[in-house]
Amino acid sequence: MRKKRCKAFLLSAFTIVLLLSVTACAGKAPKTIDTYASAKSDLYASAAELEAAAQLVVRVEKTEREENVAEPLNAQGSYHGYTLSEVSVKEVLTDSAGRNVQPGDRLQILENQFTYAEQDGTQAICHINRYVKMQPGKEYYLFLRYSEENGYYVIPVSYTHLTLPT
């Protein structure tokens, strides 16, 4: 009788441990990886050249609003994408695009980073030319160009948004 109780206890304990481990694994956040894609980028010898290439140079604060856009390409597992991020303009330094941007305006900025889910559920973050998107609540200087198709986009070099110290 004592052996039966011991077996029953051990079987119950094993079942509880097994159930807890399955439940714990199911509740884990998906693994995240960073991927890097290259794209043709202009090179600038100085900040003055970069500023001359920009149609709009602004100091902004990134808001919470953003839209991740990831579109599958023909090659299985390959994606094209970007993030549309909203910023609040704090200061306008240059505006040669003729769009009359003013402090307080909210702009949609196309950023060269997006996320997608791989087939195994892994969340992949794709950085085009190692670009890292802006973080909400932080201020940045942005060097932007404007297109009718895409709106404002960050000039594609690796240092076109500068984080301001707080």
Image (cartoon, rainbow, N blue to C red):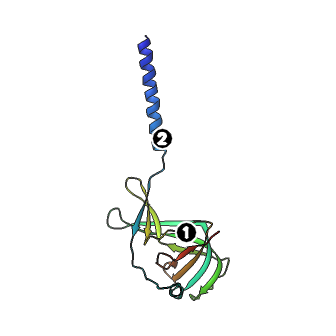
Horizontal side of residue 7 vs 105, given as left or right: left
Q: Look at 60% across and 86% down and name the residue there.
A: 94
Percent of width and height locating residue 41: 42, 80
The 10 Å Cα crowd at callout 2, few under 14, some 14 to 19, many 20 or more, is few
Q: Look at 48% across and 50% down and name the residue there.
A: 29
The residue type indicated by label 2 comes to Ala
Residue under circle 1?
134
Query: Could you say which is closer to the camera, residue 2 or residue 98?
Result: 2
Q: Look at 43% across and 19% down and name the residue there.
A: 8
* Image quarter in which the N terminus is found: top left
The 10 Å Cα crowd at callout 1, few under 14, some 14 to 19, many 20 or more, is many
Mark 1 or mark 2: whose residue is earlier in sequence? 2
Horizontal side of residue 44 vs 106, given as left or right: left
Horizontal side of residue 138 vs 81, given as left or right: right
Residue under circle 2?
24
The residue type indicated by label 1 comes to Met
Query: Element under label 1?
Result: loop
